[in-house]
């Protein structure tokens, strides 16, 4: 929907999911659905002590902005917030947040899903593992499944 | 005109620096040409770029394919497939 400007934040600090929902919905009576997706750091059965997220400053904001604007064009959203953290993140902590608000649930569900699929394969972030035994675990490898997940949103060429 | 090259993740680690300014020699027209030229600059570049197909490239902070022309790009970033989200 024209007029919706996605809020994009790339930050080291944690975020508050409830506060982010409230900032989209406060003072409004036209929103009927809010879908949030939070991505957290997991410990891989105790093997992992932290993830180090490297990012490309400038391009990270720009690329997520491009993806978010596409979402706003494709679905009738009334609000959209995307937050991606960088730096060292411990198991149990937040990594990424998408909040999509719309009149009816389908648009919010689909837009949040689309955003996450595209973030995975196009947002310039890289995860390095730190292992519980103190060693460096190396860079997380990209999954082909994530590319396929993004491909399914491609529109047929007219 | 010098071009700023920026490296991330294991591309940065293998090349051994986060960024550098280079003068591109004549004849370097596309991203693929750039990758080929960089590989000839030393063992660390060869090590980082030995499988050019997996290297992702951004021109002025936008994703591009390897056939893209690089004419006039101020900033070219090279990095592995992304793993955010």
Image (tube, rainbow, N blue to C red):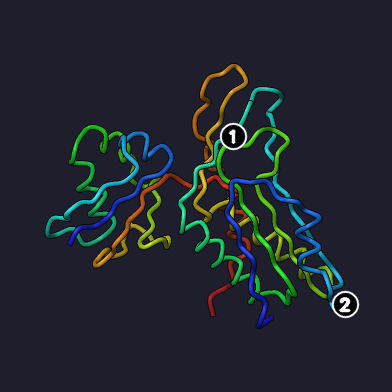
Q: Secondary structure at mark 2?
A: loop
Disc nearest the viewer among 1 and 2: 2
The chain letter under disc 1 is A
Identity of the residue drawn at 71% across and 25% down: A45
Q: Is residue B82 left or right of residue A115?
A: left
Q: Is residue A153 above or below residue B84?
A: below
| Residue to which mark 1 is pinned | A51
Q: Secondary structure at mark 1?
A: strand
- Which quadrant of the structure image shows residue A24? bottom right
Identity of the residue drawn at 27% across and 63% down: B70
Residue B41, percent from left and from top: 18, 40
Mark 1 vs mark 2, CA separation in Å: 40 Å
Residue at the outermost bottom position? A2
- Which quadrant of the structure image shows residue B67? bottom left
Q: Quadrant of the C terminus of chain A?
A: bottom right
Counting every numbered tag in the picture gives 2
| Residue to which mark 2 is pinned | A29
Q: Residues within 10 Å of mark 2 (few under 14, many from 20)?
A: few
Labels 1 and 2 share a subunit: yes
Q: Quadrant of the N terminus of chain A?
A: bottom right
The chain letter under disc 2 is A
Q: Is residue B15 above or below residue A76?
A: above
Q: Residues within 10 Å of mark 1 (few under 14, many from 20)?
A: many
Q: Nearer the viewer, residue A80 or A9?
A: A9
Residue A105, percent from left and from top: 83, 68
Residue A110, percent from left and from top: 73, 65
Please tell me which of labels 1 and 2 falls first in the chain.
2
Q: Nearer the viewer, residue A22 or A158?
A: A22
Q: Is residue B36 left or right of residue A145?
A: left
Identity of the residue drawn at 68% across and 63% down: A81
Q: Are marks 1 and 2 in contact (CB under 8 Å)?
A: no
């Amino acid at each position: 929907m024209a007029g919706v400007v996605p809020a994009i934040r790339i930050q080291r600090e944690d975020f508050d999911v409830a506060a982010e929902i409230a900032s989209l919905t406060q003072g409004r009576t036209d929103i009927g659905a809010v879908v949030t997706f939070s991505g957290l750091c997991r410990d891989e059965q105790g093997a992992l002590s932290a993830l180090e997220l490297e990012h490309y400053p400038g391009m990270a904001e720009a690329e997520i902005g491009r993806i978010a604007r596409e979402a706003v064009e494709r679905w009738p959203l009334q609000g959209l917030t995307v937050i991606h953290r960088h730096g060292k993140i411990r198991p149990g902590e937040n990594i990424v947040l998408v909040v999509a608000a719309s009149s009816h649930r389908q648009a919010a569900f689909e837009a949040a899903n689309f955003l996450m699929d595209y973030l995975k394969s196009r947002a310039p972030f890289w995860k390095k593992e730190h292992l519980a035994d103190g060693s460096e675990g190396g860079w997380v490898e990209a999954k082909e499944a994530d590319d396929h997940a993004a491909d399914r949103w491609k529109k047929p060429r007219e | 005109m010098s071009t700023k090259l920026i490296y991330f993740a294991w591309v940065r680690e293998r090349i051994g620096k986060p960024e550098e300014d280079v003068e591109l020699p004549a004849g370097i027209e596309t991203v693929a040409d750039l990758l080929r030229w960089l590989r000839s600059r030393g063992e660390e570049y060869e090590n980082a770029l030995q499988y050019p197909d997996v290297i992702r490239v951004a021109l002025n902070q936008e994703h591009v394919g390897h056939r893209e022309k690089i004419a006039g790009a101020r900033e070219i970033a090279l990095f592995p497939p992304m793993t955010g989200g």
